[in-house]
Image (cartoon, grey):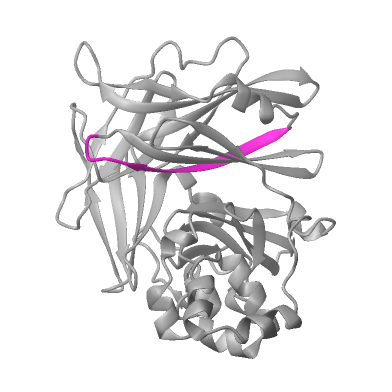
Amino acid sequence: MDGDRAEPTSNTAVGLCLLPSELIHEILLRLSIPDLLLLRAVSRTLSSLLASSDFRRLYSPASSGPCLFVLTKRFPRDALLRVFHPASSRWLRLPSALLPSSTDPYLLAASGDHLLFASNSRRELLALNLSSRSISTLPHPPLGPRRTSSWRRSGLKLISDGSHFRFLFAEIVGERPFLYEYGSATGTWRSSEAVTNLQPVRGGVWLNLVQFGNESVILRAGPSDEDYPIVLRPRLSAALIPRQVEEPLRVYGGDGKMVVVRSTAVGVGMRVVTAVEVWAVTAAAGGGVEWEMVTAAPEEVVEKIRRPFGVMMGCMEEENESTGVIMRLRIVLVSNLEGSWDITWLGRDAAGSWVWVPVPAPESGSTGFFNMAGIVLSSSFSGLSLLL
């Protein structure tokens, strides 16, 4: 918790309950989810009020903002799921009872109140609904049971519409690109072979298939079940090809854009970040499509994250207009150096300003944090389900 923030006590809760009910509601509606959870823990009266349907209807999900889910393990079957709330700079620990037990889970994706896990021991997909606090097992996909190592983060996407969700992933089978989609409303899978498209398109879900040399293969799934998938092969410009021994990290967000993180060596097994760039699929001058850089983090932001690391991975989410213009962008980079983890949160707002959000280490001193088992962003997680 923040060092300069006073924790609620039972006396604070009692004093709050003595206020007029209208004023209590007005105060609670202005608090973040972490603050509400702390109040709930010290007062049964407030706990009942926060769990009421009236409060849940009035409380704005926007007050919670985007969240970062991190799954860690002390042992293969001893997992901890935490949520980072950037607006309050706090970590929340979800009850262990919500997690799939004895399945060696790996966190694949999140959207709204839905989280998707892959079980390495059972080779199954498990969906957690935080609102109903229920876990369901998905039927095996058309490609059969898969281990966690078979799931490529850049080639899958989870989309929640409230009570139901769609899970999409792309694979090349027999040198042909396929889209596989599961719908929780019907409880069934369907597969579609993608067709080649030479012109840029907007909207939909973009899944990375292959990255080799100066070319890449991307599958675009339409926004609805009726749209057929298409394949684009954007070329990489000379500016994106690794310079000498530099190998940039590429993070795909599922919206036709990717983050390129450049770094340089500073010692044996150590590197530091030198640039964070955002690239998008655009029309090429000679026809077809290509990757083009659209924005980059300013030097003063990069300087804040210029810390040595050994290995790094990342995730990103964006909100954009129908024109394709970036409105808001969130990037999370997770690095490890000799067993010590570090998390970096970068954001870009609608005005084009970049920000760096400090992410404190959750539960400092806990050895459970050192075994990472999945990290995902969710811009639509309201957090209201945690108040039940």
Relative height, residue 122 to residue 262 (above, below): below
* In the rendered image, the vertical position of residue 347 relative to residue 303, given as above or below: below
Q: In percent of the image, x 39 and y 71: which residue is there?
A: 139
Q: Nearer the viewer, residue 327 or 150?
A: 327
Q: Is residue 316 above or below residue 69?
A: above
Q: Is the stretch drawn in magenta largely helix, strand or loop?
A: strand
Residue reaching furthest right?
A: 365
Residue 315 among magenta residues: yes
- Place residue 346 in its image quadrant: top right
In the image, 22 versus 46, the foreground residue is 22
Chain part drawn in magenta: 310-323
Whether 383 is among the magenta residues is no
The residue sitting at 75% across, 29% down in the picture is: 308
Say which residue appears at 41% left-offset and 84% top-offset. Answer: 53
- The residue drawn where x is 41% and y is 71% is 138
Quarter of the view holding residue 302: top right
Image quadrant in which you'd find residue 41: bottom right
Left/right placement of residue 232 relative to residue 358 reads left
Instruction: List x then y, in percent, for residue 30.
Output: 51, 65
Pick the quarter of the image with the N terminus: bottom right
Residue 333: x percent and y percent?
A: 60, 39
> In the displayed structure, does residue 16 sit left or right of residue 169?
right
337 sits to left or right of 297: right
Image coordinates of residue 194 in percent, x first then y, are 22, 43
